[in-house]
Amino acid sequence: MRFRILGSLKVLRPDGQPHTFERRHSRILAVLLLSPNQVVNRDYLIDAVWDETPPATAGRQLQNCISHLRQQLPGAGGWKHVIAAEPAGYRIHLDTGELDAQVFEAAVAAAQHHQAAGHLADAATRLREALALWQGPALAGMTGRTIEAASARLNEHRLTALENCLELELQQGRCAPNVPELVELVTAHPLRERMVGLLMRALHGTGRKSEALQAYDRLRRHLADELGLDPGSQLQELHTSLLRHEPASVAIGQTAFRQLPVPAKHFVGRDSALGELDRLAAEAGGETVTITVIHGTGGIGKTALGIRWAHRAAAQFPDGQLFVNLRGFHPTREPMPAAEAIRGFLDAFAIAAEQIPVSLEAQANLYRTLLAGRRMLIVLDNARDADQVRPLLPGGSGCMVIITSRNELTGLVAMEGAHPLTLGLLSEQEAHHLLSSHLGRARLDAEPGAVADLITRCAQLPLALAIIAARAAAHPTFPLATFSAELADTQRRLDAVDGGDHITGVRPIFSWSYQRLSTPAAHLFRLLGLHRGPDVTVPAAANLAAIPSSLARQLLSDLARAHLVTEHKLGRYTFHDLLSAYAIEQAQTFDGEAERRGAVRRLLTYDLYAAAAADALVAPHRRRTPLPDHAPPSDLPCFGDHAEALAWLEVERGNLVAAVRQAWEGEEFEIGWRLANLLWGLFHLEKHWGDWIGTHQIGLDCARACGNRKAEFTMLSSLGTAYRELGRLDDARGFHEQALQVSRDDGDRHSEAQALNGIGAVLGAAQLTEQARRYLEWSLEIRREIGDRWGEAITICNLGEQDLDDGLLDQAREHFLEALRIRQEIGDRWGEAITLNCLGQACHQAGQHSEAVRHLHAALTIHRQTRDFALEALDLRYLGMSYRQLGERKSSQACLNEAAAIYARLGMPEAEQVRALLADDSELIN
């Protein structure tokens, strides 16, 4: 079969005859075809078909419509049905060439490759072939917010491809034949500057200069009258060149940006990494943006690799390359805010200051709009974290992003599908080549032993090798053994590889400063090197060194004055990797293993007890994590309420996550799993998916290493919850089933009920209603039997959510009211808010919108108090929808705008769904 959406929706049988569909079936099919071979969420389909006002039976009606479509569209190519049911929705399976939109995108991509190779005629031919697929506006005649938005996107892609085609044809001197087509296009799109620029060049190329100038004047008047704007700088430049009788060579909208820095001269090796980047570049231009995170330790050559490859691959990105140093890890400056980076890119696009919006979100949207339809390479160097990077990512296909960072940026890998590329040390052969490129083969051949020592003592680290090679090159008469001997001296090793600039020039400063420290300050400095987190507080440092807080504060001030640490925030101290390496080296020299292990154990114990104090307020009704039977550490933080405890966990997150891993590596297994478990409340509220899964996987390893079955159950159960919330339902069920087996082996009825509830929740999320109910009812029976009222309310609420999904509104309300009563009796404010939200949803579906608003406002109040941002956004979303039904448009839009902002900040896909609701509201108002 062949599917057509570039024009009216058509499905052609193998004999060429068209299928006919009912209106609703056509809308469902259109939405599926807009995301071929991808799962389309059921809720999204329902919203698309009923435009945000679905009936209570929408889920059932959708199933019936899908069933009819599957009967009309038999499977092929190994698929039983063209449309397949998935746990979260439906997927339409299409082979290559079956959908005209996919053929169009493939032809456009092929044209880009031809253009990059300099084959302009072939590129223009492929674009004309792509454009010939269009038989009218995309999905012509079909209405609805979702479909109309997608149609507009496709129509914009067509116009961009047409402009690119005409640009290529003008470059080949085909001016006269294109004038009629361009006149028609400019008449249809009078404010499209690139189109006007193409017409001006075509007219000028045929000797019709006065008409070219008239075209400019018409656009200028249109822009001034309708928008109060002037033409862009490139079009003004073209206009000026015509007035001066210069060649009309300015290509509007096609400036190729060339921002890459000079590549490192002495770059060697990295063949595997370069090959992997080549492979990923070949995939760029598919359905999503290609993102690669090059990560590794400082001085490993991440930036050098990224810039080297970017220069090598520049021809594959004909629209240019953008570059920014985000200063995520910089010895003297703060990380660059995303807003500053975006502003720099907008300046590169020559966007006038008065046309740049105020908010970061709006600026990011403008930035993504400018990238749409372009094939560009964006290099984001020295990133600190995923939050710094996300606003800088393009929104569509065609572009490739290279990110370098000392962090793994697991969040980007988990949520945005980034490809991690770990950069390790050079091989011995590569290290030899690096020295040879600086010093020449003859000098290395004369002292092979000294060369081998240099490579070993520089740890095959590119930065250290480059610095020692530069020093040797500056002293050509010095034997290489001289530098090797310097490196052999552990007290002077870092001095020997000090380059003296702003990146490495601090080495002699902190080594000389260290010698002048008092004995207590030097001792604290050495122990700080054992701390794995990003920074350290005064109480943490006090416990690390087993000294009073007052003394720790004084010593940290001494170290800050000596520039051996930096107080980057009030009461929080940090140092960069080179200082850390120096501190560790000194600790290994002057402090015995037992002392070092004792210091690490004291710090981890402090982290454990401090996290426990915060967790008691953040998640008060969870089963408490048992703590070791000894006196608690000193100087533990005190929290006045839930908000203070959660804020502390968020600030300390980097340190606590690092502590979990350090506990595993130091064989402090009991601390490791306990600390991971105490972070559950933070992760559940703030949705730090990468940290949640990473710490709890380590916690599971710790639990198994120390043979603690209850701890093993706890980690398995939490991992199941994390994967369920991420939508990875198979993984979630696997962890919950492992947890169930552990609980039954140990005869732990409380844990068994929890595991059964977890499996039921996963099955419910997969729309396996009957199975979900069975597991939830088993869980409820046990929880009532053992008197677990907190767990009982959870399971009752989950049963109510199943009722809600099945349209059993009265039964759902009964479950929610019962759960609410229990949660209010036991003082479970967190659970109370969840239940109030569920009641609000039930009332909304039943058309009782005033009642829905009452419940949702009550839920919102509690969620704001507990800082449960994801559920706060859910409250606001349903409030917006209920206000809309009550005709209160301003209240509806205010709630939806706030919900969209929260979802966007959390990196959750619901942000786009809420924005779609807002767009629909805007259309209704207009």
Image (cartoon, grey):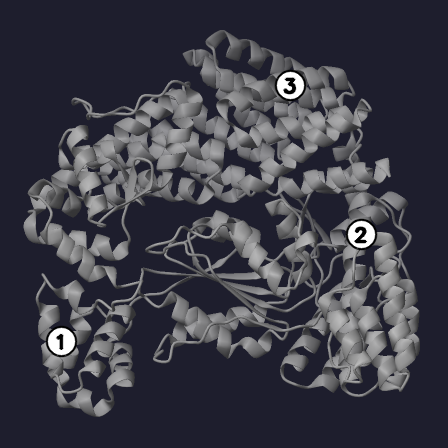
- Categorize mark 1 by other alpha carbons within 10 Å: few (<14), some (14-19), many (20+): many
Name the residue nearer the viewer: 225 or 628.
Answer: 225
* Residue at disc 2, secondary structure: helix
Residue 828's place in the image compared with 724, above or below, is above
Kindly identify the amino acid type of the residue bearing the numbered disc 1.
Answer: Phe
Q: Earlier in the sequence, mark 3 or mark 1?
A: 1
Question: Where's residue 217, x and y in %?
Answer: 88, 68
Corner quadrant of residue 68: top right
Q: Which residue is mark 1?
A: 483
Identify the residue shown where x is 11% and y is 47%. 517
Q: Which residue is mark 2?
A: 30
In contact (CB < 8 Å): disc 3 and disc 1: no
Identify the residue shown where x is 39% and y is 71%. 304
- Quadrant, the N terminus: bottom right
Q: CA distance from mark 3 to mark 2?
A: 37 Å
Q: CA distance from mark 3 to mark 1?
A: 71 Å
Question: Where's residue 773, x and y in %?
Answer: 59, 26
* Residue at disc 1, secondary structure: helix
Q: Is residue 687 left or right of residue 62?
A: left
Single out the mark in the foreground, 3 or 2. Answer: 3
Identify the residue shown where x is 56% and y is 9%. 821
Residue 423 seen in render = yes
Single out the mark in the foreground, 3 or 1. Answer: 1
Q: Earlier in the sequence, mark 3 or mark 2?
A: 2
Q: Which residue is mark 3?
A: 857
Question: Where's residue 206, x and y in %?
Answer: 88, 86
